[in-house]
Amino acid sequence: MAIDEGLLKSIPYFSGLSTAELDSIKAHIFERSIEGSGLILLEGEPADAMYFVASGVVKVFKTSSEGKEQILSFVRPGESFNDVSVFDGEPSIASAQAVKPAVLYGIRNSDLDLILRNHPQVSLNVIRVLSRQVRHLVSLVEDLSFKHVISRVAKILLEYASDGTEPKSRLTQQEMAALAGTAREMVGRSLRSLEDEGAIRLDHHRIVITNKEALREMAER
Amino acid sequence: MDLMPALDREKCNGCGLCVRVCHCNAFVMIGNLVAVVETDFCGWCTHCEAICPMGAISCPFEIVIEER
């Protein structure tokens, strides 16, 4: 299948590039389709390529020796994953799995080197993308170190709430637990507490944020 | 008919714990396979998701902001 040039232009890595530059980069990109919720890469395995999500959503996560999962991020169209491992040449730092059928655009290590050498603008873009990733991970460390579970759950709800303009991923309580670094039961308890506080309403398969300000205050505690 | 929990047949080991824990009979055993039956009575309690040892059941929540 042909690489979608419109999508390529929207990827922060390739921001500010001319059509001719994009055409030359396109030659180094391969497409990979993931059916269902398939595993894309495993933590600790050699990192031979980085990926951009063209469609679908990809979960990037760590797994403890006891099987506990910590989700680092959900990667959406235009965003990248496994880039750090490709840049430092070390094994993949986290596993990645599609949460629904996904199409990925991949670049192999050797091709990425070539692109960075030939297109200095991409290097500048990469610095910005990696800086955002560091900011996100520092925020995650802060939450896991200093915040109570209920605050973490409140923050997740605010972050994943749909304002109606774009469809967001739906989250299970297990996924919320893996994002918040806690047990599933604690998420259930937190959701009930937030409902008691009047910040949310549990309505069958929907979590309705009824008082955004109250939820924000909870998230910042 | 409202949305029902999703069952991943590839992960399901047919243990039947979801059938036992479900109050609204949304899960049934057909031979040694679990099946989801559409029902109006599913209250999205998520007990099925919690009890499944294989992580084969998911009850995802849509998170929305209520307009005031």
Image (cartoon, rainbow, N blue to C red):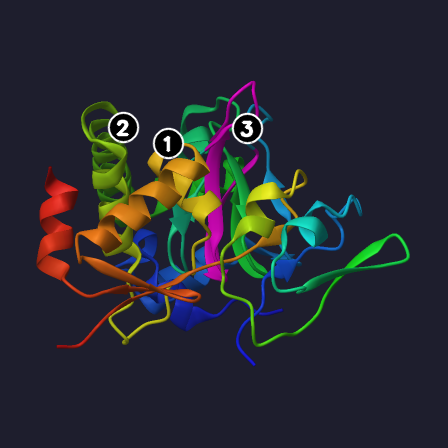
Percent position (x, y) of residue A174?
A: 48, 44
The kind of secondary structure element at disc 1 is loop
Residue A102 visible in image: yes
* Chain identifier of the residue bearing label 3 in the image: A
Residue at 31%, 49% (x, y): give it: A191
Closer to the camera: disc 3 or disc 2?
2
Among the 4 quarters of the image, the one containing residue B8: bottom right
Q: What residue type is labelled 3?
A: Glu
Among the 4 quarters of the image, the one containing residue A129: top left
Residue nearest the observer in this picture, A86 or A81: A81
Q: Which amino acid does label 1 sit on?
A: Gly
Highlighted magenta segment, given as a residue range:
A48-69
Circles 3 and 2 in contact, beta carbons < 8 Å? no
Circles 2 and 1 in contact, beta carbons < 8 Å? yes
Residue at 70%, 70% (x, y): give it: B37
Spatial CA span between label 2 and label 1: 7 Å
Q: Is residue A177 found left or right of A165 in the rendered image?
A: right
Q: Is the magenta stretch mostly helix, strand or loop?
A: strand
Residue at the disc numbered 2: A144
Circles 1 and 3 in contact, beta carbons < 8 Å? no
Q: Which amino acid does label 2 sit on?
A: Leu
- Tell me the quadrant of the picture where the C terminus of chain A can be found: top left
Tag 3: Cα neighbours inside 10 Å, few (<14), some, or many (≥20)?
A: some
Residue A120 visible in image: no
Percent position (x, y) of residue A168?
A: 37, 64
Residue at the disc numbered 3: A43
Tag 2: Cα neighbours inside 10 Å, few (<14), some, or many (≥20)?
A: some
Q: Per the image, is A107 magenta?
A: no
Residue at the disc numbered 1: A181
Q: Which residue is at the far bottom? A: B1
